[in-house]
Image (cartoon, grey):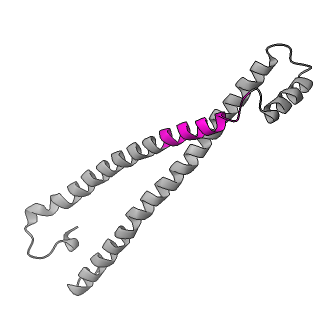
Amino acid sequence: MSDAMPESAPQQTHWLGPMLVILIGTFMALLDSSIVNAVLNRRIAMHTEQLRSGVTSWNPNVIEFAQKAGAQLGGLAGGGKTVVLAYLQALVAKAAYVQGIDEVFIVSAALTLAAVIPALFLKKNAASRSAATGRGAE
């Protein structure tokens, strides 16, 4: 750690660097998790609404699915359509969650990329500073 500090820096400030790294890291982890939760909740709600609009009892695809399910189960009487609609709604909820997770992954990847690019420049700057002072990494 002393290699990163200039010669003229007082010895008492050596604790400040690691403390700031821990503080900023903790803050960014909290911020990232709140961003991820907000994006996930909004996207799940949006996808659920979009997908559920197509799952109705008068949709021809739903009617065909209900008939096929009824044939495979030996006929669904009366409440069979309700069972099929409930099953399809559960599938919609799962699909919406998966689509939300996909979009959270994209946002997380973008945030990571946004953090890595400046970190690469910091690493290069630290290496060039140590080369300029004549000290190598020990």
Q: Which quadrant would the C terminus be assigned to in this image?
A: bottom left
Q: Residue at x 35, y 69 (%)?
A: 118
Q: In the picture provided, is 121 more to the left or to the right than 66?
A: left
132 up-or-down from 14: above or below: below
Q: Tag count in the figure?
A: 0
Q: Is residue 90 visible?
A: yes
Task: State the residue at coordinates (65%, 34%).
Answer: 53
Q: The N terminus lies in which quarter of the figure?
A: bottom left
- Residue 76 vs 119, above or below: the answer is above
Q: Position of residue 103 (x, y in %)?
A: 54, 50
Residue 42 shown in magenta: yes
Residue at the top extreme of this rendering = 78
Comparing 27 with 94, the one in front is: 94
Q: Position of residue 82 (x, y in %)?
A: 75, 19
Q: Is residue 36 above or below residue 67?
A: below
Range of the magenta residues?
Answer: 40-56
Q: Give the image quarter of residue 50.
A: top right
Q: Which residue occupies the foreground of this view, 22 or 121?
A: 121
Q: In the rendering, at what x and y percent does residue 47 appear? A: 59, 40
In the rendered view, does 126 fall on the left or right side of 32?
left
Query: Which of the 4 image quarters holds residue 88?
Result: top right
Q: Nearer the viewer, residue 39 or 118?
A: 39
